Image (cartoon, grey):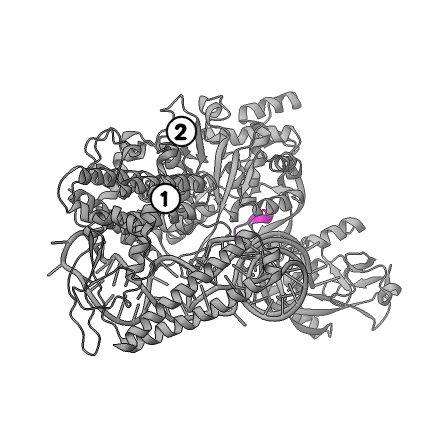
Amino acid sequence: MIEKTYRPNDVESRIYAAWEDSGAFRCGRRPAAQPYTIVIPPPNVTGSLHMGHALNNTLQDVLVRWRRMQGRDVLWQPGTDHAGIATQMVVERQLAQQQITRRALGRAAFVERVWAWKAESGGTITRQLRRLGASCDWSRERFTLDEGLSRAVRKVFVELYHAGLVYRDKRLVNWDPVLHTAISDLEVDQREVKGSLWFLRYPIEGELGAYIVVATTRPETMLGDTAVAVHPDDERYRHLLGKHAILPLVGRRLPIVGDPHSDPEKGTGAVKITPAHDFNDFEVGRRHGLPMVNIFDEQARLNDSAPEAYRGLDRFEARKRVLADLEAQGLLEKTEPHVYTLPHGDRSGAVVEPWLTDQWYVDAATLAKPAIAAVEQGRTRIVPDKWQGEYFNWMRKIQPWCVSRQLWWGHQIPAWYGPDGRVFVAMDEAEAAARAKAHYGKAIELRRDEDVLDTWFSSALWPFSTLGWPDPTPEVARYYPTDVLVTGHDIIFFWVARMMMAGLRFMNAVPFRTVYIHALVRDEKGQKMSKSKGNIIDPLDLIDKFGADALRLTLTAMAAQGRDIKLSEGRVEGYRNFVTKLWNAARFCEMNGCRAPAGFDPGAVRSSLARWIVGEVARAARAVDGALEDYRFNDAAGGLYQFVWGTFCDWFLELAKPVLTGADGPDKDEIRAAAAWTLDQILVLLHPIVPFVTEELWATLGGPRSTMLIEAPWPEYADGLEDPKADAELGWIIRLITEIRSTRAELNVPPGATIPLLHRDVGSDTRSRLAAHGELIGRLARVGPIAAADGKLPGGAVQIVLDEATFALPLADVVDVAAETARLGKQIDKLVAEIARLDAKLADETFTARAPAHVVEQQAERREEASATRRRLETALGRLGGG
RNA sequence: GGGCGCGUAGCUCAGCGGGAGAGCACUACGUUGACAUCGUAGGGGUCGCUGGUUCGAUCCCAGCCGCGCCCACCA
């Protein structure tokens, strides 16, 4: 028996456990089948499920369940990411509450603490994915710091190093002064800030009272200036080229150099050059052989290269001091308000400081070439294709990738240094030692590089490292390349591009045949959800409130290509109602004894109603398949929603009611069987999107089922099922009923009266068709007089007699004459205008000459229809006026 | 500064060269025999603005206005 109401929270965990216990999620159980592989974008171990995860994993689960039902050998490879910076920060914060710092603890103890934390809390996100219904093969769960994956990381690093594609270099990096680590360009956010532009006077050497004025947004960096640059063609400064300025507060002689970097339009046209703390200035410095004076320590406090008065000051403190001192000396010419962008670390939020350090780099430009070619040649397709452009743009001007991080949590770089600084890159310490011995001619103590790798370095290997690479496992052979990667556009560069590079380099094949880029989930105002804005909608709250299916259906239905999703709770509620509707439809079927008989042949049904719904099922199924093939998730969900509610419930079940409540017999048996069969097909088709409720109904309704729904076969329908004749007949009935309903004002007659149906234009054809279906429609009717309200005309049931069939239709109608008159009048006006428009069109010679014939015909038909409707309305209006 | 995208019903959005659509919200009426509701009907839109192409433009093109995102080293 189906319960009166569906309580998702009571059944979801039970059903999920049954799925998982049955082994249905596991790959490899259909050795003969074609594999279908998706690797999950590994969420951070520190994470908990947010709306982006919910969308991302719902879409993957829809695909995976659909393919599994189609009989493919599905692997949905799950796992989590160690998320270097994020995780380290979480644990550090926790330590801070106990007044412990990471450094006080020491590296080994700290890393141990992180592992302990992971053991305790790292399972949160995967538990939450289960609540969502994600059918990952959990037996294969991986973690980016697993031993196997770490070996893959080391191997990749070592091989790239020996190929010259990983190297150590001293250049400016984005330094995060709070986290004390370098970060890559991608981890820097440009944020607009309101600040000032200060104009500083640098005295010209040997020319008393002469200045060159430079403008800057960061006056404290002047302490590290080593030149002033002007444009070589700038007339204003030509006389100063080759001379020197004296750096105030420091006293350093600064050459005044000509360099095209200097833009005569900006500032004063003369720019201070700080090669150690500005990416442009760094280049200028290289061109002119300028010294690089690093004035900051790792916390961006002034170091000993600054004059004594400023040493130890924070950079913003130093700014105030420098400005005050310059002003005191009359060297601050003016200050203007200025809005500009400043780089911020995406994790710490601190203003990033360009800083000169030694770091490890990956030669991304070389690795990018095959990755670009793969997409150009269509070996990997990016959907929707607009993202292909973004991918190309970025890949074609890709910069060296800084992969070393001054953190403790992560893959420690497999590089060892000898006493003379010579580096030995190797898979492990023993190998490094052996190399060192060969090099130095004796065993020697080595020091391991302290740094760890950027998290994304290990993520780049995810599609093959999770399958067991570098070991030649059967999984690598069978499941690589993966079929599709489902992800948001925010990590195309961070992740997708790098997986492409790594996959092509080490597997010699693209990591995925298709990349499906979905929208981001925003709040109902279209703003990014963030903790600081407090506008986060927690998917788990929604699951508690409406059930996982409602959330999944909402996200699937809203996953249209090309637009971000603005999610509101009301939306989820609406889709929850759909789940309820489905539940009740199933209940109705059960109550009416609708059982799918064994061996039901949808092609063999006789009645129009049954033939029609069978065809509609086939049509809906094809639409779902087509939509999912093209990653039009919204069309798949929307089509099913429409089919279940609008076609199956509103029409089929309503039309079936008279039969189901009528006398027993073959007609009734057939409708019962067709209803049960259709419901079964609905459960199957809906299962990938709303797995829980469909599985529950499948089990309850079932009779004997050989499998759970999750493993039921996806339907394929024979071509003949869509019967044009049945379509026409049912289509006609539906239109007829709709028309009777909508023209109830015209039929406003006393209860029990007998009138000819559609007193106008009922031709013989119509009459015969009505006769054929009379009984069905006749039973559909319910009779009952309606009480009249005060001041209104009484409505009532209308009996319609036509040929041998008798109809009684409920006319619920209590009609407000004035309102109705006004309404009809308005509609007539509209129609008159429409008819005039169509008349004009048909009279237009250019139109009739140039437009395709079918269009002309169409217009003529429309004109006829419109004037018929107008006549009808006028009749109704006359009747109302008369009454 | 460059690039991309978006402005369609009160809200959230589909559609995209030939009669303006859905869901939610709203109004009216009806529903205690599948429906935490549901059903039927209804109101509401110069499809951002201005030009152009076309027999015909919400749809194609150009410009403008507004919004958002991405990229960028600009003082």
Secondary structure state at the residue bearing disc 2: loop
Q: Tell me where residue A162 appears, x and y as whole percent.
A: 64, 28
- The disc numbered 2 marks a residue on which chain? A
Q: Is residue A550 magenta?
A: no
Res A252 seen here = yes
Q: Tell me where residue A136 appears, x and y as whole percent.
A: 37, 35
Where is mark 2, residue-wise?
A72
Q: Tell me where residue A193 appears, x and y as whole percent.
A: 58, 65
Q: Residues within 10 Å of mark 2 (few under 14, many from 20)?
A: many
**Vertical side of A123 occupied by A149: above or below:** above
**Vertical side of B48 occupied by A150: above or below:** above
Q: Which residues are magenta?
A: A179-186
Secondary structure state at the residue bearing disc 1: helix
Q: In terms of depth relative to the viewer, which is nearer, A809 or A116?
A: A809
Q: Residues within 10 Å of mark 1 (few under 14, many from 20)?
A: many
The numbered mark, 2 or 1, whose residue comes first in the sequence reads 2
Q: In terms of depth relative to the viewer, which is nearer, A408 or A443?
A: A408
**Residue appearing at x 18%, y 74% in the figure:** A789
Which residue is farthest right? A239
Q: Are marks 2 and 1 on the same chain?
A: yes
Of the 4 image quadrants, the one containing the C terminus of chain A is: bottom left
The mark lying in front, picked from 2 and 1, is: 2
Where is mark 1, residue-wise?
A125
**Residue appearing at x 80%, y 56% in the figure:** A260
Is A310 situated left or right of A483 in this image? right
Q: In terms of depth relative to the viewer, which is nearer, A249 or A713?
A: A713
Determine the image quadrant of residue A225. bottom right
Asked if the residue at tag 1 contacts the one at tag 2, i.e. Cβ–Cβ closer than 8 Å, the answer is no
